[in-house]
């Protein structure tokens, strides 16, 4: 039996799930592998498949020192199947089955619901790789290029993680779903990815850093909720994925922070104080702060849609079934069953935003979304610190949850980022100031030129304070022509 910490690293599929002794699942995964590699070559990072990239690879699930760094060609990356160590005698922490021993097999009555949760999570992982596949051509430095590829290979590993669960616990159905996960394509008219934000384009590096700040953070919240699951293999899988996910949000938040730092520095050097003087700021070859605000408005609202409707019976059912819990369930001070509790939800009542107490079980999406906003607000606060330290008078804000929504209570309603209702005419007049315009996109595209000399950075982004794995500033993170 695998002990949950030792990793078999030498085989085709590194793992700590005892694949060597599980010929049925090993065979299913080995059959799936060539299709995955084809997908990676077709839909993974365009133009860099032969480059040597300084990547971390998970080689253990030990909290201290689970990764090793080294130069790898991405198609040869070791995409392993790694579960966090089992918690001895773990009990289900919430829902109808609270207090029962955690399940090691799928309860028959929840099979369909669990399969759907796995497929939805699994679908997001390859989608983001597809969305980001052209960014290598315009990376602002080798450091950033490497970070992009690190995120990409780990999203690939997250796909493996979900495919393992499908193939191990769902037989022929699971194998079919695993094939479908390679068949759908981000933005494809006939076979799109399952969720809206994962069919949007990621055309430039500001979009990439915003995506990793906001949308990867939705991923973190979903994984946190699934890490509570009564189905123990899912809980252990998600717990290990979360260790990798932290780096994705670091890439996003520090990326935007470095763009802001560079903008403020260039404005100061040019004696420019007024952030609203966009033409003058853009002439400096940096990205104006109002455009960064519009990108926040867009990416935050797209990501809020991923949490689903504020009032949701699906979310209630998954919680009741002890399949999907809340953010930091164990730290919450209630009965973890929620049959008699309420939770305040923002609703659209007669065209106005109203706060209503609703049964807590039906409001779990809203609650996870609130936890998300708390988490991301801390990041925006750190961006504002960068601006404040530079002495420029400007503040970035998260948009109101009613702004620019396609799903839930505020779908299709017109509110500004401060939560004030707008008529259709007012929206039309203000849209270009609230969301990125095509002119913004052209401006960003004009800045996107590859910088591939070690230690050099594009005009519009500051270097990082420290290198990856403590490497020096001029380290050649990607050897493009080896
Ligand atoms: Fe992921
Ligand atoms: Fe991620």
Image: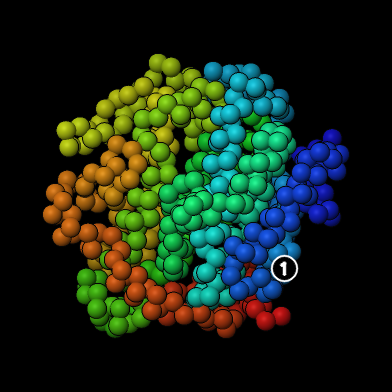
Q: Is residue 345 above or below residue 452?
A: above
Residue 161 position in % (x across, y down):
66, 45
- For disc 1, the neighbor class at 10 Å (few under 14, some 14 to 19, many from 20) is some
Q: Is residue 372 above or below residue 292?
A: above
- The residue at 49%/32% (across/down) is 326
Residue 464 in the figure: left or right of residue 290: right
Residue 320 position in % (x across, y down):
51, 22
Residue 276 in the figure: left or right of residue 169: left
Residue identified by numbered label 1: 72
Residue that sits furthest to the top in the current view: 340
Residue that sits furthest to the front in the current view: 190
Residue that sits furthest to the right in the current view: 21
Q: Quadrant of the C terminus?
A: bottom right
Where disc 1 sits, the SS reads: strand
Q: Is residue 172 in sight in this rendering?
A: yes
- The residue at 21%/75% (across/down) is 277
Q: Nearer the viewer, residue 359 or 133?
A: 133
Q: Quadrant of the N terminus?
A: top right
Q: How many numbered dots are placed on residues in this image? A: 1
Indicate the quadrant where residue 455 lies. bottom right
Tell me: is circle 1 under 8 Å from ligand 2.
Answer: no
Q: Is residue 168 above or below residue 447?
A: above
């Amino acid at each position: 039996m695998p002990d949950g910490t030792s990793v078999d690293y030498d085989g085709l599929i590194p793992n700590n799930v005892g694949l060597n002794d599980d010929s049925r699942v090993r065979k299913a995964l080995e059959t799936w592998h060539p299709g995955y590699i084809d997908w990676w070559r077709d839909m993974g990072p365009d133009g860099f498949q032969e480059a040597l990239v300084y990547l971390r690879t998970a080689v253990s699930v030990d909290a201290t020192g689970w990764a090793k760094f080294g130069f790898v060609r991405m198609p040869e990356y070791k995409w392993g199947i790694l579960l966090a160590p089992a918690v001895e005698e773990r009990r289900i922490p919430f829902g109808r089955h609270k207090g029962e021993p955690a399940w090691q097999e799928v309860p028959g009555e929840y099979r369909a619901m669990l399969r759907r949760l796995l497929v939805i999570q699994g679908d997001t992982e390859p989608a983001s790789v597809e969305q980001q596949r052209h960014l290598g051509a315009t990376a602002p430095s080798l450091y950033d290029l490497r970070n992009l590829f690190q995120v990409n290979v780990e999203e690939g590993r997250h796909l493996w993680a979900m495919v393992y669960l499908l193939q191990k616990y769902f037989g022929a159905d699971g194998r079919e779903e695993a094939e479908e996960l390679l068949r759908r394509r981000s933005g494809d008219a006939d076979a799109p990815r399952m969720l809206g934000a994962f069919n949007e384009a990621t055309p430039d590096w500001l979009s990439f850093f915003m995506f990793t700040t906001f949308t990867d953070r939705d991923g973190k919240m979903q994984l946190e909720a699934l890490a509570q699951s009564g189905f123990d293999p899912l809980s252990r899988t998600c717990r290990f994925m979360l260790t990798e996910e932290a780096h994705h949000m670091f890439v996003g938040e520090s990326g935007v922070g470095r763009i802001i730092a560079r903008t403020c520095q260039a404005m100061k050097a040019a004696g420019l104080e007024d952030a609203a003087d966009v033409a003058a700021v853009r002439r400096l070859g940096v990205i104006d702060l109002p455009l960064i605000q519009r990108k926040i408005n867009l990416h935050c609202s797209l990501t809020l849609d991923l949490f689903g409707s504020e009032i949701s019976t699906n979310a209630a059912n998954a919680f009741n079934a002890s399949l999907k819990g809340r953010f930091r369930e164990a730290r919450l001070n209630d009965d973890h069953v929620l049959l008699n509790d309420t939770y305040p939800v923002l609703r659209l009542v007669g065209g106005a935003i109203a706060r209503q107490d609703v049964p807590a079980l039906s409001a779990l999406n809203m609650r996870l979304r609130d936890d998300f906003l708390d988490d991301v607000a801390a990041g925006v606060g750190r961006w504002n610190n960068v601006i404040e330290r530079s002495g420029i008078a400007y503040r970035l804000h998260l948009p109101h949850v009613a702004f620019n929504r396609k799903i839930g209570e505020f779908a299709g309603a017109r509110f500004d980022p401060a939560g004030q209702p707008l008529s259709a005419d007012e929206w039309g007049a203000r849209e270009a100031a609230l969301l990125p315009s095509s002119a913004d996109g052209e401006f960003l595209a004009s800045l996107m030129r590859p910088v591939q000399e070690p230690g050099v950075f594009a005009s519009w982004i500051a270097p990082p304070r420290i290198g990856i794995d403590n490497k020096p500033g001029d380290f050649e993170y990607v050897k493009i022509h080896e």
